[in-house]
Image: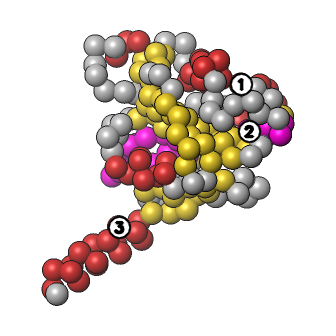
Amino acid sequence: MLLGGVVNAQQNEENKRWQTYSPDAASFSIRVPGVPLPAQGHIFDPSDNEIAHRLIEHGLHSKTYNFEVNKGDKRSFLVSILEVQTAKRCDHKFITDSEAESITTVIGDDIVRSAVVGQVKENGEVSQWTYKRKRALGNDEADGMVYVRRWNNCMVIVVVDYDHATAGDSEITVMLDSLRLR
């Protein structure tokens, strides 16, 4: 009985650390491991909102959100989110290769991406892939990942760029799985 109480206390403390990130007027919410801090940099530039929706077939308009998550005094990872409203007509469930390539180009010119993997989840269709910078090709670790959730006429593109995090970090998986579209 005592061990169960200790485990529950640890889980409760862990749950307190997580915050919900849901900006005003956004069509999504996401749980973040810790306080989402103002971003020191970005993948999606907020000043590009007028044209960023063109990355997506049938995109109408977009909004950009950027934050970072620190562990201790170091940035663990940067999160850059592009929310795109699309026309109702959509001939495909998952992101197309040309859309994935357009997004990857925004991340940087020296980026190599993995194949796009798609799956249907409870709250929309998910497409995802990892990327690495060409200068790091000798390294097996990815430099970041792209996670795209589509639901009706909304698509949320989340780029997680690793600093002191890795693709295998459970916090990143839990964070991305918590993405909900409204």
Colour scheme employed for the rendering of this structure? secondary structure
Q: What type is the residue that disc 1 sits on? A: Leu
Picture coordinates of residue 114, whole percent (x, y): 44, 21
Residue of label 1: 55
Residue 18 image offset from top left, x and y in percent: 45, 63
CB of mark 1 within 8 Å of CB of mark 3?
no
Q: Residue at x 49, y 12 (%)?
A: 110
* Residue to which mark 2 is pinned: 84
Question: Mark 3 or mark 2, which is nearer the start of the sequence?
Answer: 3
What type is the residue that disc 3 sits on?
A: Glu
**Residue 62 in view in this figure:** no
Q: Give the range drawn in magenta.
A: 66-88
Compared across the picture, whether 50 is left or right of 116 comes to right
Image marks 1 and 2: residues in contact by CB distance under 8 Å:
yes
- Of badges 2 and 3, the one in the foreground is 2
**Which image quadrant for residue 157?**
top right
Q: Residue at the spot x=63%, y=29% of the render?
A: 95
The amino acid pointed to by label 2 is Val
SS category of the residue bearing label 2: strand
For disc 3, the marked residue is 14
Nearer to me, 55 or 72:
55
Relative horizontal placement of residue 107, taking residue 137 as reference (left or right): right
In primary-sequence order, the first of circles 1 and 3 is 3
Residue 54 in sight in this render: yes
User: What is the crowding at mark 1: few (fewer than 14 residues within 10 Å), some, or many (at least 20)?
Assistant: some
Q: Examine the structure image and report whether residue 91 is included in the region drawn in magenta.
A: no
Q: How far apart are marks 2 and 3 (CA)?
A: 32 Å
What is the secondary structure assignment of the residue under circle 1? Answer: helix
Image quadrant containing the C terminus: bottom right
